[in-house]
């Protein structure tokens, strides 16, 4: 049985990786999906592969006018989302570093997209949901925001810890408005984002050895929890972190 019939979801970073997988799954659960990505070709191609149930929009989440325009355009077309997955993010491999070696510019570029961009997505999602009947906002966190896992990635890890905090604050502020806010925490998941690790057998083996179930995550691994959080099954779930990480954060 389709679990998201009648819902409209906007997924940022849906041109690739986890966002793409989640958007495709939402469509299979009968939701309409807005594929929001700064990569116009990737967004168009994912939307075309899904078909009528999808549309693409080019958004840079770090630019407020771009985020606002995406929500305004969706509302004008009758596609105002009641599910928003604030998932787009970057990890600047080769630049992000331990604190003493981290350039301020790399810190700022990471925070601008991962934390400020997620905040802007959440801000305009809340506005859209206040203007309708509420909804579900789902953020993508990381084990690096919870443990010392990201010791070589100070900016990335701090941005993800910020997302975890944003989840709780916004959830509490809008709980009475029927808006739920939760974060999904995937483990190391093999997408283009982490090809620096997956292309290097030694680095890959080291990170997989820190996942108790003994394998890397795939984008499909997080689809189920995203469907649950988007659906009415999760009506009493808000302000929480949901780890689907093969036990990585249990260590
Ligand atoms: N892959 C992992 O191991 C892993 C683990 C935990 C959390 N995450 C998080 O999951 C999310 C998705 O990661 P992924 O692995 O699917 O990455 P990915 O690189 O495969 O896909 C990210 C997508 O986001 C888009 N994007 C990047 N910056 C953007 C911006 N400013 N505006 C709009 N779109 C933008 C990219 O074009 C791309 O399509 C990220 O927030 C990431 O931090 C990933």
Image (tube, helix red, strand yellow):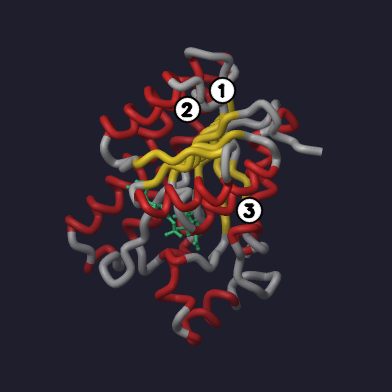
Q: Is residue 32 left or right of residue 234?
A: left
The residues tagged by marks 2 and 3 sit, at their Cα atoms, a distance apart of: 22 Å
Along the viewing direction, whichever of 23 and 248 lies nearer the viewer:
23
Measured from the top left, where is residue 143 in percent x and y? Answer: 52, 57
Q: Looking at the image, how many numbered discs can be counted on the residues? A: 3
Name the disc covering residue 179, or none. 1
Q: Residues within 10 Å of mark 1 (few under 14, many from 20)?
A: many
Disc 1 vs disc 2: Cβ atoms closer than 8 Å? Answer: yes
The residues tagged by marks 1 and 2 sit, at their Cα atoms, a distance apart of: 9 Å
Of the numbered discs 2 and 3, the one sitting upstream in the chain is 2
The reply to whether residue 225 is in sight is yes
Is residue 67 depicted above or below 213 in this figure? Answer: above
The quadrant of the image that shows the C terminus is bottom right
- At horizontal 36% and vertical 69% (from top left) the residue drawn is 152
The quadrant of the image that shows the N terminus is top right
Q: Disc 3 designates what residue?
A: 222
Name the disc covering residue 170, or none. 2
Dot 3: what SS?
helix
Measured from the top left, where is residue 220 in percent x and y? Answer: 64, 58
Q: Residues within 10 Å of mark 3 (few under 14, many from 20)?
A: many
Q: Is residue 246 left or right of residue 165?
A: right
Along the viewing direction, whichever of 17 and 154 lies nearer the viewer:
17
């Amino acid at each position: 049985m389709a679990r998201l019939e009648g819902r409209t979801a906007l997924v940022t970073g849906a041109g690739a990786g986890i966002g793409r997988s989640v958007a495709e799954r939402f469509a299979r659960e009968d939701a309409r999906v807005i594929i929001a990505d700064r990569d116009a070709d990737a967004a168009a191609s994912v939307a075309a592969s899904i078909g009528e149930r999808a549309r693409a929009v080019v958004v840079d989440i770090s630019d407020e006018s771009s985020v606002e325009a995406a929500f305004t355009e969706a509302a004008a077309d009758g596609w105002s989302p009641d599910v928003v997955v604030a998932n787009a993010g970057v990890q600047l491999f080769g630049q992000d570093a331990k604190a003493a070696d981290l350039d301020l510019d790399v810190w700022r570029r990471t925070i601008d997209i991962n934390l400020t961009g997620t905040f802007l997505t959440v801000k305009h999602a809340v506005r859209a949901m206040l203007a309708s009947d509420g909804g579900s906002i789902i953020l993508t966190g990381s084990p690096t925001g919870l443990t010392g896992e990201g010791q070589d990635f100070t900016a990335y890890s701090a941005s993800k810890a910020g997302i975890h905090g944003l989840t709780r604050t916004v959830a509490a502020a809008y709980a009475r408005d029927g808006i739920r806010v939760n974060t999904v925490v995937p483990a190391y998941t093999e997408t283009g984002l982490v090809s620096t690790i997956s292309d290097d057998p030694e680095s890959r083996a080291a990170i997989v050895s820190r996942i108790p179930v003994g394998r890397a995550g795939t984008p499909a691994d997080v689809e189920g929890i995203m469907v649950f959080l988007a659906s009415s099954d999760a009506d009493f779930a808000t302000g929480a972190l949901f780890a689907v990480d093969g036990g990585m954060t249990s260590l």
